[in-house]
């Protein structure tokens, strides 16, 4: 049994989640439930592999080892039932780097990118930052999360300059794990309009049983030439600081050009510890992940019960995937700067939903932490709302 209950201080470790506001605003005591990393130690085999490598003491340039590529191939087969070939893998130092490069490569300046909101902000900020127009096809959220296929097809029919869909599978922040039928319907449409689908699957391993992740590359072989999959062990095993991820690109022309651009922009060599971490996690991490997911699921269920009792007007369902709870506080008529007030006056930091677009009143709560941290954080939310007289 792995230990997910122990609380470790991350203050003073250059942690984005715990240190960014502590030092900038001199906030000593803020419970951080925002940015998407975990407060758990990674599998011990990963730390051991890194220490072992560090002891060698020589950290020159690196090439992707066969061990690392085979670990990806084996993981994708074991966990997502897809067959990956070595020549279709390009290692990168982050999924957002890959997104940026793919947009630059595949979408001309006068062309457009489609995204489905609410969604992880770099999906729209990154293309916009390199002057690619972004068009929005919001998800249908009620009574359950669905892709608005009709709107999507209408948009594509009316505007031939839309060339790429950036899609979140499973979905951050709404926690939806897409079914094979849903993905197939989506791909039928994107294929009709010759769209490239970039499927960000960084949360793929965080699907709660009995559901199973369906890879965009596992829907139907006939679509795969137009699909690029972005994967990583970083969310799964809490390795974001290792800066290791990969693109799986069955289309050989797109793959070669992407690899060329990655190399030209400095990624000819990947961080030595990133390789080690990936290989160890994908080789030895299965049991850790199983237990970690069970722990997170229990946190999600605890949160549901807590909200039912303490903040019954909040709308929240335990998600199908991810460690991110997507909670609608709008019935409490909290002010626009609710997240700021919680942070500076309440001593707890949630992720303001507005950053994900189309999400007034929502907060994203990171549940990948020891129960004690989550309880403390949520109690602070309630205390702050009481003090401010926002509870009805
Ligand atoms: C959907 C999604 N993609 C990408 C990332 C970040 O990936 P990376 O750190 O590899 O750039 C995140 C982080 O939260 C995410 O939720």
Image (cartoon, rainbow, N blue to C red):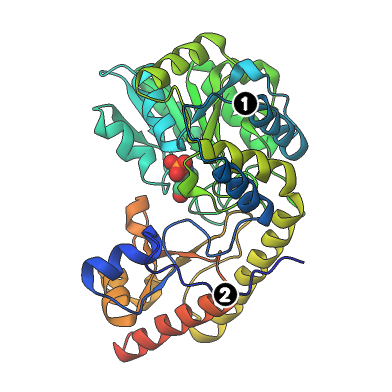
Q: Where does the image place residue 27, in percent across and percent down from the top left?
A: 28, 76
Cβ of disc 1 within 8 Å of ligand 1?
no
Q: Which residue is mark 1?
A: 65
Q: Which residue is mark 2?
A: 303
Q: Where does the image place residue 185, in percent across and percent down from the top left?
A: 62, 30
Cβ of disc 2 within 8 Å of ligand 1?
no
Pointers 1 and 2 in contact (C-beta within 8 Å): no
Secondary structure at numbered mark 2? helix
Q: Report the mark closest to the observer, 1 or 2.
A: 1
Q: Is residue 322 left or right of residue 381?
A: right
- Is the residue 297 above or below the residue 142 in the image? below
Q: Where does the image place residue 220, in percent across and percent down from the top left?
A: 70, 23
Tell me if mark 2 has few (under 14), some (14-19) or many (20+) residues whose alpha carbon lies within 10 angstroms of its own.
Answer: many
Q: Which residue is located at x 74 percent, y 49 percent? A: 286
Secondary structure at numbered mark 1? loop
- Res 301 seen here: yes
Quarter of the rendering occupied by the N terminus: bottom right
Callout count: 2
Q: Which residue is located at x 64 percent, y 49 percent? A: 46
- Is the residue 207 above or below the residue 246 in the image? below
Quarter of the rendering occupied by the C terminus: bottom left
Q: CA distance from mark 1 to mark 2?
A: 42 Å
- Is the residue 152 above or below the residue 146 in the image? above
Q: Nearer the viewer, residue 142 or 316?
A: 316
Tell me if mark 1 has few (under 14), some (14-19) or many (20+) residues whose alpha carbon lies within 10 angstroms of its own.
Answer: few
Q: Nearer the viewer, residue 366 or 92?
A: 92
Disc with the residue nearer the chain's start (1 vs 2)? 1
Q: Is residue 321 left or right of residue 30?
A: right
Q: Where does the image place residue 130, in percent across and percent down from the top left?
A: 26, 28
Q: Nearer the viewer, residue 343 or 46?
A: 46
- Res 336 seen here: no
């Amino acid at each position: 049994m792995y230990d997910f209950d122990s609380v470790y201080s991350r203050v003073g470790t250059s942690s984005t989640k715990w240190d960014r506001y502590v030092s900038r605003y001199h906030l000593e005591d803020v419970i951080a439930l925002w940015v998407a990393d975990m407060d758990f130690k990674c599998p011990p085999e990963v730390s051991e592999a890194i220490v072992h490598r560090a002891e060698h003491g020589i950290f020159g340039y690196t090439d992707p080892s066969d061990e690392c590529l085979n670990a990806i191939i084996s993981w994708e087969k074991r966990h997502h039932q897809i067959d990956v070939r070595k020549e279709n893998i390009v290692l990168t130092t982050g999924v957002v780097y890959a997104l940026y490069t793919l947009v630059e490569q595949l979408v001309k300046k006068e062309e457009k990118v489609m995204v489905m909101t609410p969604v992880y902000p770099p999906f729209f900020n990154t293309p916009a930052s390199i002057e690619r127009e972004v068009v929005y096809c919001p998800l249908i959220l009620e009574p359950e999360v669905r892709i608005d296929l009709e709107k999507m097809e209408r948009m594509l029919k009316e505007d031939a300059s839309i060339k790429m869909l950036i899609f979140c599978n499973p979905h951050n922040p709404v926690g939806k794990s897409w079914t094979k039928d849903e993905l197939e319907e989506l791909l039928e449409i994107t294929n009709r309009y010759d769209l490239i689908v970039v499927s960000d699957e960084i949360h793929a391993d965080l699907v709660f049983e009995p559901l199973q992740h369906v890879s965009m590359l596992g829907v139907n072989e006939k679509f795969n030439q137009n699909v690029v999959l972005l994967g990583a062990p970083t969310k799964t095993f809490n390795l974001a600081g290792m800066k290791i991820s990969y693109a799986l690109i069955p289309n050989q022309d797109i793959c070669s050009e992407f690899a060329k651009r990655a190399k030209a922009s400095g990624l000819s060599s990947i961080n030595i510890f990133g390789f080690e971490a990936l290989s160890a996690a994908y080789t030895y991490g299965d049991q850790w992940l199983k237990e970690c997911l069970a722990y997170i699921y229990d946190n999600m269920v605890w949160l549901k019960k807590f909200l039912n009792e303490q903040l019954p007007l909040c709308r929240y369902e335990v998600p199908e995937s991810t460690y991110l709870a997507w909670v609608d506080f709008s019935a409490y008529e909290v002010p626009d700067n609710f997240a700021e007030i919680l942070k500076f006056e309440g001593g707890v930091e949630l992720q303001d939903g507005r950053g994900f677009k189309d999400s007034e009143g929502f907060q994203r709560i990171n549940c990948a932490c020891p129960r004690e941290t989550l309880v403390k954080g949520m109690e602070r939310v309630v205390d702050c709302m009481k003090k401010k007289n926002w509870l009805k």
